[in-house]
Image (cartoon, rainbow, N blue to C red):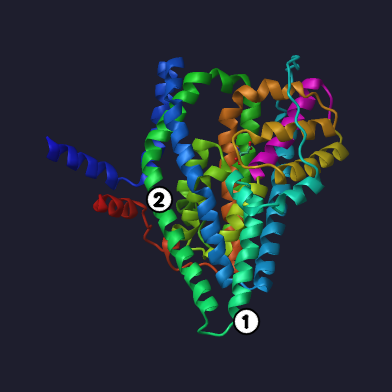
Amino acid sequence: MARLFRSAWRQYRSVPIVYRIGAAFVLGALVGLGVGQPATSLQPVGDLFVRLLEMIIVPIIIFTLLMATRELSPKNLGKVGGQVVLLYIATTAVAIAMGLGMSNLINPGAGMTVEQTDVQTEQTPSLVDQVFNIVPENPFAAIAEGNILAIIFFTLIFGLGMTMVRAEVEPDSAVRNGIDTIFDVVDAGAEVMFKIVWGIMEFGVLGVFALMAALFGEVGVQAISAYFTLSLTLALAIGLQISLVYLLLIIRGAVGASPVAFLRGIKEALITALSIRSSTATLPVTMSDADENLRVEERVYGFSLPLGATINMDGTSMYLGIVAVFAANMAGVSLTLVEQFTILLTALLASIGTAGVPSASLVMMTAVLTQVGLPLEVIGMIAGIDPLLDRLRTMNNIAGDLAVTTVVAKWNDAIDLSSGVWTETPVEFSEESVSVSDND
Ligand code: ASP
């Protein structure tokens, strides 16, 4: 009996984790639809999975970012940073334009009317506040609060400080040895974190099953049908953004690599984003994919991915544009070109200032709709379907971070295109999971 169980377990573990999570995703949804409301009691299991991922976000950012500073001079950091930020802004602008274009074609919300509901409006932080938020008053408080931009800022400064001091002191001095030791410890810490990520993903099979069962137990399919055109517009715009901008233009065009290999390399991150609706909580998996599958060096992804999870939200900002047209259609007004441009700018700024957490868009939406005088009640109406649409947006957000990271790595000689997923034989994660089980 025990042997049977062991061999079944081994067989189960031999299936790559991403497929097991994919199956859990579908099964969970079916169970949720079949069982209905009682399935929501599974929610805590899903929440535990998200918490486990959240637990390692801060250490993984600090470790990988410090490693990035070990290899980057301030000048190179400026170059890589500039390229990353510019591309993040450019791809976000394209995404919003794509969303607006698709909405103008499909006209979501046409024929519907706005119902009066209570909407809690929240202010998006002003530009000055956003800049001040980056500089922590107390780095330890920033770490404790998980304020990612502030953590990035302090870690970069600390890392650059270490490399500068290291260059100034005598080769065999205690200070230099100390700094080398810190870097070695950090290097080991990053490796350990990646090991932990995959341990957490093993639990993720259960977690994702629970999340999907709870979601569909709660909302059912009616939610999708009520807002069919809105969901369709978002899904089509995201499909275009991923296939045209990331795969064709960036990966095929600028990197000169295979889009299929790229997708193969980022599938774990995509399915995690789909399951947990948070770019930030997906970060450990995103980083692990960049490192192990895409073979990008820490000096690029250690900086670009934490930053991207916070400021680069293509799917989110695209959705803001779509909802603006949706609201206008329901209010029976048509948006002028100037108004659509205002939406583009507001959505761009709003998406930069918001954390990658579930349903963050709903907060940003108040800013965008107010800017062009559209009814805020729309937010209350679409909040019910948000747990579904948020998944698509988050997946797009993550894909955008990874596409930009890949091309910037290529431009800075920080990617090995002759190994990982880029080679003919796909490197399957199962090897990793089997080696984990071997240690059990
Ligand atoms: N959930 C998204 C993210 O974490 C943000 C949003 O669109 O609401 O990236």
For badge 1, the amino acid type reads Glu
Answer yes or no: disc 2 within 8 Å of ligand 1.
Answer: no
Residue 98 in picture, x, y percent from top left: 70, 42
Q: Most extreme residue toward the front, as rendered?
A: 174
Q: Can you tell which quarter of the image residue 425 is in? A: bottom left
Q: Is residue 390 left or right of residue 198?
A: right
**Figure quadrant of the N terminus:** top left
- The residue wearing badge 1 is 168
Q: Is 43 left, or right, of 71 in this rendering?
A: left
Sequence-first disc among 1 and 2: 1
Q: Which residues are magenta?
A: 314-334
Q: Secondary structure at mark 2?
A: helix
Query: Who's the residue at 52% across and 45% down the image?
Result: 282
The local crowd at label 1, few if under 14, some if 14 to 19, many if 20 or more residues have their Cα within 10 Å, is few
Three-letter code, disc 2: Ile
- Image coords of residue 242 (percent x, y): 59, 47
Q: Main secondary structure of the magenta part?
A: helix
Residue carrying label 2: 196
Q: Residue at image x 81%, y 48%?
A: 128
Q: Regarding mark 1 in the picture, which secondary structure is present there? A: helix
Residue 157 within the magenta-colored segment of the rendering: no
Observer-nearest residue: 168 or 63?
Answer: 168
Residue 312 seen in the figure:
no
Which of the pair 96/279 is nearer the observer?
A: 279
350 lies left or right of 19:
right
